[in-house]
Amino acid sequence: MAYENSNQNYQRTKMQKDMIIKRLREEGCRITKQRRMLLDVILEEECSCCKEIYYRASKVDPGIGTATVYRMVNKLEEIGAISRKNMYKISCSAECDREDACTVEFDDNTVKHFSAKTWNRVILAGLKAYGYVNDQKIRSVEMQSCM
């Protein structure tokens, strides 16, 4: 059963990738190894921002530049393949075990990565401190970039 579900996800992702590549070609884009790799990162992982995409992509190809990531994300948004509004959606409950559920970047370029459980505790503590919640549990948080 797990293999079947994994195979379905692979087929869906492969179809999405093929459709996006076709659309990029129609827009006159060359399909380079780096662009293919970035598509893989974006389709396979739930990234919350361009810096996180860059962070994951640089593990695969240390020579990739941030400008390449930003240009690719802009192009994907331009052709309607992604929406930055949806890139910042986080849906993790307190029981979620995902280790890299949230990345926070500060104005001094410091970056902090939080597990889903830690991120949930941080948000809940802040909401309780300001009197916004009593015994409710967070179902999801949607964030949008300030830029």
Image (cartoon, grey):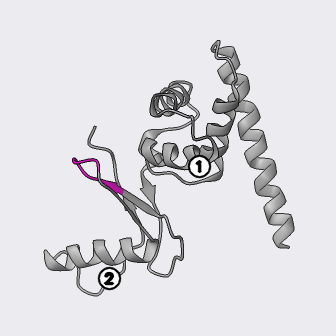
Label 2 sits on residue: 136
Q: Is residue 68 left or right of residue 5?
A: left
Which is more toward the observer, 103 or 92?
Answer: 103
Q: Is residue 78 left or right of residue 126?
A: right
Q: Residue furthest top?
A: 28
- State the residue at coordinates (22%, 47%): 107
Q: Is residue 44 left or right of residue 84?
A: right
Residue 135: where, in percent of width, then height? 29, 87
- State the residue at coordinates (77%, 40%): 15
- When asked about the image quadrant of residue 29, the answer is top right
**Does residue 62 belong to the magenta stretch?**
no
The disc placed on residue 115 is none
Label 1 sits on residue: 59
Three-letter residue code for mark 2? Gln
> Which type of secondary structure does the marked residue at label 1 adopt?
helix
- State the residue at coordinates (76%, 48%): 12
In space, the residues marked 1 and 2 are separated at their CA atoms by 38 Å
Magenta span dominant secondary structure: loop
- State the residue at coordinates (51%, 45%): 53
53 over 64 or under it: above or below? below
- Give, as a single range, the part of the protein colored magenta: 104-109
Is tag 1's residue or tag 2's residue first in the polypeptide sequence?
A: 1
111 over 81 or under it: above or below? below
Q: Quadrant of the N terminus?
A: bottom right
Residue 10: where, in percent of width, then height? 79, 52
- Mark 1 vs mark 2: in front: 1
> Which type of secondary structure does the marked residue at label 2 adopt?
loop
Residue 34: where, in percent of width, then height? 64, 32
Which is more toward the observer, 74 or 8?
Answer: 74
Residue 4: where, in percent of width, then height? 86, 65
Which is more toward the observer, 132 or 17?
Answer: 17
